[in-house]
Amino acid sequence: MHQRVVRIAVKFCILGSPENWYVRDLIRAAHEHSIQVRSFENISANCDRSGHWHVKADDCVLSECDAVFVRTMPLGSLEQMVVRIDMLHMLQQFGVQIVNSPRTLEIAIDKWLTLYHLREMGVAIPATECCQKREHSMEAFERLGRDVVVKPIFGGEGRGIMRVQDADLAWRVFSTLEQLRQVAYIQEFVPHFGYDVRLLAVGDRIAAVRRESHDDWRTNVSRGATAIPIEPNEEQVGLVKRIMQRMQATTLGIDLLPAHNGKSYLLEVNAVPGWKGTAQATGVDVAAWMIEAAVRQVEVAQGIKE
């Protein structure tokens, strides 16, 4: 595979944990560049008496970096979540390249907002309802055929997802969510073949795998599914390009579910995708792809041509 020659040294910061496998993989791939790792919880900002703005994480001045990778978005209060995104928007205004952009993160972090954008694009999605009250959630459970998947509106990797087929269990689940002041995000269960397709897009490149699970209706590699490399078809490539453009993204993990009815449903779009299983299955150095894509963004921002 042709590797583009790196012409500039880039100052990176990764927002994440230094113990995280993906963070370590990015550090490995970015050996030609300056790179630091800082925690999202430690970001702060100030405007000094001269009217100059600064955003930093501990001793790393993020506003002086060329690019910032967002490898986590920790749960927090509404204020914390809003301020974190605000600071990313500020960094972007200062000319720092954010991977992914704040707007991409805003859409993808929220499954309901992601779903809206996908449906507006005409993409096939499972019938979905989003409710705050138990009584409305129970009505949705009935409308969706008493076989539903309940998901946290934030989060990924199959964590916190339940398939609910019993009305008594549904009543308990929706009661608990209402007591916790959480939203019920409810989708019809789509009968499928025991696998889905993960399309991992980085810049203009795509790595694709079929994720098979024989012991669990969920097909996440993090839950024991097996990843098998595949070649994306023309329709999938076109879909990826459209979603990347709509979400203003540098990298996305896009999950498609081929169903018994012949349709392929888009289940989720992840703006902080994992790639360990995909990299192992395909042999692609995804972290290197991500570094190259970020470097190219910096070059374009600085007016450096190919």
Image: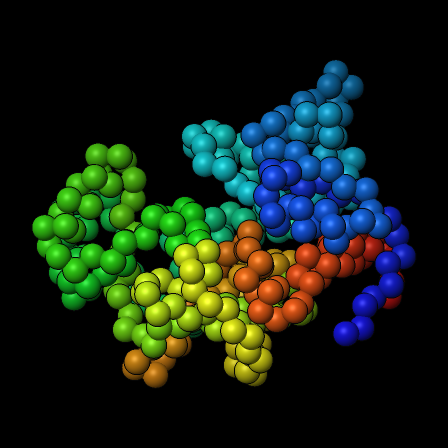
Q: How is the image coloured?
A: rainbow
Residue 54 figure quarter: top right
For the question of whether residue 129 can be seen, the reply is no
Can see residue 284? Answer: yes
Vertical placement of 55 versus 222: above or below?
Answer: above
Residue furthest to the top in view is 49
> Could you tell me which residue is drawn at 67 percent across and 67 percent down?
284
Which residue is located at x 58 percent, y 59 percent?
A: 275
Residue lying farthest to the right in this orientation = 7
User: How many marks do you count on the picture?
Assistant: 0
Q: Is residue 119 left or right of residue 164?
A: right
| Quadrant showing the N terminus | bottom right
Residue 204, given in percent of the width and then of the height, sits at: 68, 69
Percent across and percent down for residue 269 are: 48, 60
Residue 101 horizontal side relative to residue 74, left or right? right
Q: Is residue 72 above or below residue 248?
A: above
In which quadrant of the rendered view does residue 246 lie? bottom right
Q: Give how far across and how far down residue 6 sits, in percent.
A: 86, 58
Q: Quadrant of the C terminus?
A: bottom right
> 287 or 48, which is in the foreground?
287
Is residue 5 placed above or below 263 in the rendered structure?
Answer: above
**Residue drawn at the location 29% of the way across and 40% of the way down:** 182
Q: Position of residue 157 (x, y in %)?
A: 44, 54
